[in-house]
Image (cartoon, grey):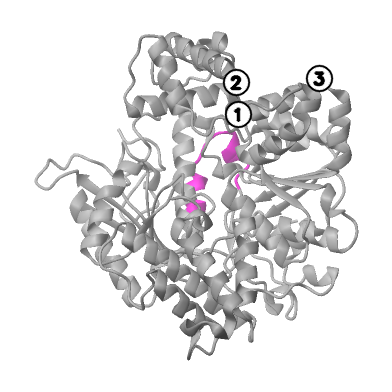
């Protein structure tokens, strides 16, 4: 078991620590597929190895930030498959984002465990629904509604309401919350009151819009993403033969980010598993930041109650962050309250010492943004790649001033939330061009004089807009260049890992990555909300706008809501590997009255402050 008390263990020389546990989640090259099942376990620390070897019965992995949870569970699956204990087609691994599922598939492929299903809950359920619908219901599955907003707008109009874009988004989110908490329109108002939830409109009115939305879907024979889960739950409950079929197909389940499951997802999972117990869940209650969408850590925290014989492993060795970053993260959680706080993990950094976190107070927001941009430019000049730097904020509307400041400073950046890498038009065009060049081989005059793989790729992509120097400014031209530059870097890494590789080999690798959504990194400073940063990490992180009213956000009223805001800041802090900067501005605009206060969460943690993170009087 892990040393949760915070004392780092002292293994004798020659063990895993000296044999080199690689960084938990940070790798740019192309590892060789392990030759044997036992080789899959090489480089795992004792607790990760315990996870990998726990292949039977219920398993609960409590994994702190940066402790290598994805590594542990992918090596667990790969070891089971390679050792012949698990049949690949009988394993279903589910997570919450396409990016996370793609990363899992990519890692399993690198470990030689192909054929395992790694999907989001929605993707797995949709696949089953499409297969069983003709048998369970008959006819074709109704069309899946990609975006609800237009239909929600029509539903509101039926209720004689006009909603602006922001209101539409909020009402749509509220309908999603109702559905994942299995709340029907008639019960919505009571559910909101019970959850102490701030509804964006009068609950009675929202209930009417929700009801009209459901009616519109029925009228037009369409379903939404939540219906996919609801319908699959209904089929598995009503049709024992179909439930038996699914349970015959899938024998082993792995659930990543288990603290984020909604009641509806848990219900579906229970139906998948049935009365068996081959279930491995992985999560960290201290990273529960999506309760507004219906996520709850209760399933994780109560796992041992529901499964008394479960194997429980704690991962607390943090390979991501320096002791200085980890110390602040632990200090922040030491002030937390509530059920999740009672189960917090005390992280133990495995890295060498780094710089102390930097705390900076600014007079106004533009000064904060300009100074942040300058410090980022200095970091890049000192050798930190732009793609290893992030600016994180509480709400998306804070991004604009940082976009402007970075553009003015000549620093490339990218906003989180763009379409997937391999779906970008320029990446698809580049793939077509590389495929054509690979087929033509030496008959392609473009490749004259390009001896190695990387120079061949550079030559081909130069016809698509890649240049040795990035274009000035931001916008679509810059975005296109960044995508092509990422492909060039991928080719360079591929050639380093596999000397003598050809253009055909690279094209095959790109195709496999596209199928797995295993994207390379685009080089630019990342601008993202704290929610969007979950699951990511950078060498340098700037947490900005840390004032009362923004962190915690003004509408966090209950103790539970405030504690979720604290966890959100914890997620932000633990994204940083080495450099961590925390800043706030006393006013919004130059010349304003400086009445703002820095976030209460840093009281007693930042130099010169007192208190324990409670609201200042």
On whether residue 332 falls in the magenta region, the answer is: yes
Kind of element beneath mark 3: helix
Magenta includes 156? no
Residue 211 in the image, given as x and y percentages of width and height: 52, 12
| Element at label 2 | loop
Disc 3 residue crowd, few under 14, some 14–19, many 20+, Cα 10 Å: few
Please give the name of the residue rendered at 84% of the width and 59% of the height, measured from the top-left corner: 81
Whether residue 418 sits left or right of residue 123 in the image: it is: left
Q: Which residue in the structure is indicated by mark 1?
A: 143
Q: State the separation of the CA atoms marked 1 and 2.
A: 7 Å
Front in this rendered view, residue 349 or 190: 190
The reply to whether discs 1 and 2 touch (Cβ–Cβ < 8 Å) is yes
Distance from label 2 to label 3 (Cα)? Answer: 21 Å
Q: What SS does tag 1 mark?
A: strand
To which quarter of the image does residue 235 belong? top right
Q: Is residue 458 left or right of residue 127?
A: left
Q: Residues within 10 Å of mark 2 (few under 14, many from 20)?
A: few
Q: Which residues are magenta?
A: 329-344
From the viewer's perspective, is the residue at label 2 or at label 3 nearer?
A: 2
Q: Which mark is residue 238?
A: 3
Q: Quadrant of residue 494?
A: bottom right
Image vertical order of residue 292 relative to residue 405, above or below: above
Q: Position of residue 394 (x, y in %)?
A: 37, 43
Spatial CA distance of label 3 from label 1 is 22 Å
Do we see residue 148 in this rendering?
Answer: yes
> First in sequence: mark 1 or mark 2?
1
Quadrant location, the N terminus: bottom right
Q: Which residue is mark 2?
A: 221
């Amino acid at each position: 078991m892990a040393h949760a008390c915070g004392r780092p263990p002292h293994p004798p020389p020659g063990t895993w620590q000296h044999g080199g546990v690689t960084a938990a989640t940070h790798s740019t090259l192309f590892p060789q597929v392990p030759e044997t099942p036992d080789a899959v376990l090489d480089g795992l620390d004792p607790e990760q190895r315990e996870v990998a070897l726990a292949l039977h019965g219920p398993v609960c992995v409590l994994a702190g930030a940066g402790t290598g949870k994805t590594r542990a569970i992918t090596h667990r699956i790969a070891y089971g498959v390679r050792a012949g204990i698990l049949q690949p087609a009988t394993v279903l691994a589910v997570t919450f984002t396409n990016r996370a599922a793609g990363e899992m598939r990519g890692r399993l492929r690198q470990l030689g465990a192909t054929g395992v299903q790694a999907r989001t809950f929605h993707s797995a359920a949709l696949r089953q629904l499409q297969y069983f619908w003709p048998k369970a219901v008959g006819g074709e599955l109704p069309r899946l509604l990609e975006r609800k907003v237009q239909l929600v707008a029509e539903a509101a109009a039926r209720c004689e309401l006009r909603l602006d874009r922001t209101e539409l988004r909020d009402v749509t989110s509220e309908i999603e919350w109702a559905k994942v908490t299995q709340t029907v329109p008639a019960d919505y108002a009571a559910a909101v009151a019970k959850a102490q939830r701030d509804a964006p409109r009068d609950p009675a009115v929202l209930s009417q819009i929700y009801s009209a939305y459901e009616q519109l879907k029925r009228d037009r024979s369409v379903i939404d993403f939540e219906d996919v889960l609801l319908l699959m739950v209904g089929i598995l409950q009503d049709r024992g033969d179909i439930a038996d079929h699914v349970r015959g197909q899938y024998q082993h389940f792995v659930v990543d980010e288990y603290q984020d499951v909604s009641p509806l997802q848990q219900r579906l999972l229970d139906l998948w598993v049935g009365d068996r117990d081959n279930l491995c869940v992985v999560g960290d209650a201290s990273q529960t930041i999506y309760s507004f969408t219906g996520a709850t850590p209760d399933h994780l925290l109560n796992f041992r109650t529901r499964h008394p014989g479960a194997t429980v492993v704690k991962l607390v060795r943090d390979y991501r962050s320096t002791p200085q970053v980890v110390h602040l993260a632990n200090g922040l959680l030491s002030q937390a309250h509530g059920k999740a706080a009672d189960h917090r993990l005390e992280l133990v950094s495995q890295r060498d010492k780094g710089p102390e976190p930097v705390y900076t107070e600014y007079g106004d927001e533009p000064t904060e943004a300009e100074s942040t941009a300058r410090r980022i430019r200095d970091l890049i000049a000192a050798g930190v790649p732009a793609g290893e730097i992030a600016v994180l904020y509480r709400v998306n509307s804070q991004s604009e001033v940082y976009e402007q400041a970075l553009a003015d400073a000549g620093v490339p950046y990218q906003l989180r939330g763009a379409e997937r890498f391999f779906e970008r038009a320029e990446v698809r065009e580049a793939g077509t061009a590389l495929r054509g060049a690979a087929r033509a081989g030496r008959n392609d005059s473009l490749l004259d004089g390009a001896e190695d793989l990387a120079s061949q790729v550079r030559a081909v992509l130069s016809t698509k807009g890649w240049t040795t120097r990035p274009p000035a400014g931001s916008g679509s031209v810059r975005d296109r260049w960044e995508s092509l530059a990422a492909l060039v870097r991928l080719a360079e890494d591929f050639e380093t890992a596999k000397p003598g590789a050809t253009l055909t080999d690279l094209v095959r690798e790109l195709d496999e990555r596209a199928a797995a959504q295993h994207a390379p990194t685009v080089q630019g400073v990342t601008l993202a909300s704290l929610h969007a940063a979950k699951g990511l990490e950078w060498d340098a992180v700037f947490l900005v706008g840390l004032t009362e009213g923004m962190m915690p956000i003004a509408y966090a009223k209950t103790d539970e809501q405030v504690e979720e805001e604290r966890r959100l800041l914890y997620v932000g802090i633990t994204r940083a590997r080495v450099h961590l900067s925390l800043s706030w501005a006393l006013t919004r605009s130059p010349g304003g009255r400086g009445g703002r206060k820095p976030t209460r969460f840093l009281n007693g943690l930042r130099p010169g402050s007192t208190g324990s993170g409670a609201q200042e009087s």
